[in-house]
Amino acid sequence: MISLGGFKTFFVRNFYQSAIIMADESKRIKTDNDAEVYIGTHNGTFHCDEVVGCFMLRQLPEYKNAKILRSRDIELLRNKCDIIIDVGGEFDNSRKWYDHHQKTFQETLSSLRPELGNEFKIRLSSAGLVYTFYGERIIDEILRHHADINLSKNNLQLVFKQIYKNFILEIDAIDNGVPMFDDGVEPKYDISTSLSSRISRLNPSWDEDKQNIDEKFFKAMDVAGKEFVENVINIGKSWINAREYVREALLSATKVHESGEILLLKRFCPWKVHLANLEIEYNLVGVPKLVIFSENEQSWRIAGVPISPRSFLGRKFLPIPWRGLNNDDLSSIAGVSDLVFVHHTGFIGGAKTKESALQMAIKSIQWKD
């Protein structure tokens, strides 16, 4: 994982070398000889979606040194800017105009990228629009330059979808006012520590001088950018590695036991969501029953596969007579040495060795409740 010190150097270099362009700049028209590149967005109060959108664009080689023009003068923006986001009243990918405020705009990630499936049904913000068309390239640039990671095409798409789910989707929903609960039910508490809330608080307050708002916009890009890069590296490295680890365990399950119902992970990793998705991909839904993994060489765990990743109900928990027992009492009744415990609900148990854990798991799947 890249250090925060490294992030600081990167952001200072990228954000503060290019002075922000003010809205009263002369309205000259770009020419073929104009070497400067501009990203256009609106001035005044800024929001998380265009802040993140501008940051993401500046990860791409063609916009790395781009200046940012904040204005609501549409003629100025269209004459001067190479790409415009969150202002202008039009969405046109061919012209690189990415506004989402017009009533006619109802696009979602699924409508614009149907090859990704139909699960993404929340209206896009400007961040979502930038991510839709440039996301894979942005992720690839960040991973290669900050973590020396080169993903396969398939894994890059998996990472793209996961980052949308756990980062961009929230920004899209908040910016478009999508309620978290149906039927107008009010939440019992508000979340005020989200990225959108933190970016909002960086705007000048009502009793503060507004002249430094452009400086605060860059500070907001700094804050949002650090979080986005950390998220990309986490998903592109740890998350995708865990998925590959679980995939290998699933595909080799019959080598552990002929039934294919026991997965063996030589070390713990987050496995529940990955397993649920991989079962669908390989047409093995419901087959795995127990997962064995190690915490260290002297500590192994046997966990029941839940019926869904967040469920407390399992497909096959450890036998009822074993539940709540420890050490010698457990080993005696189970007929397996070196056992440590079984939780009173049966969803997990422990053993001192891999061999004991495997025997425990085999006896469990053979047990007739």
Image: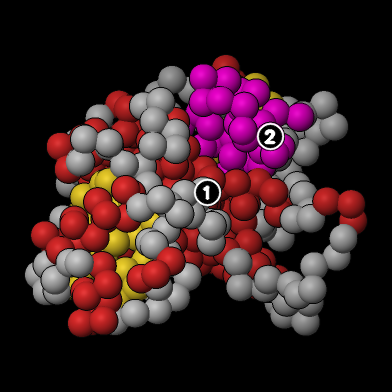
Q: Distance between the Cα atoms at labels 1 and 2?
A: 22 Å
Mark 1: few/some/many CA within 10 Å (<14, 14-19, 20+): some
Q: Quadrant of the C terminus?
A: bottom left
Task: Using the rendered image of the protein, determine whether residue 260 is visible from the camera's viewpoint.
Answer: yes
Q: Which residue is mark 2?
A: 121
Q: Nearer the viewer, residue 18 or 353?
A: 353
Question: Magenta residues, as a range?
Answer: 106-134
Q: Residue 84: image x %, image y %?
A: 60, 35
**Tag on residue 308?**
1
Q: Nearer the viewer, residue 326 or 200?
A: 326
Looking at the image, tell me whether mark 1 or mark 2 is earlier in sequence order: 2
Residue located at (87% from left, 60% from top): 185
- In the rendered image, the vertical position of residue 201 relative to residue 315, given as above or below: below
Marks 1, 2: nearer the viewer:
1
Q: Quadrant of the N terminus?
A: bottom left
Mark count: 2
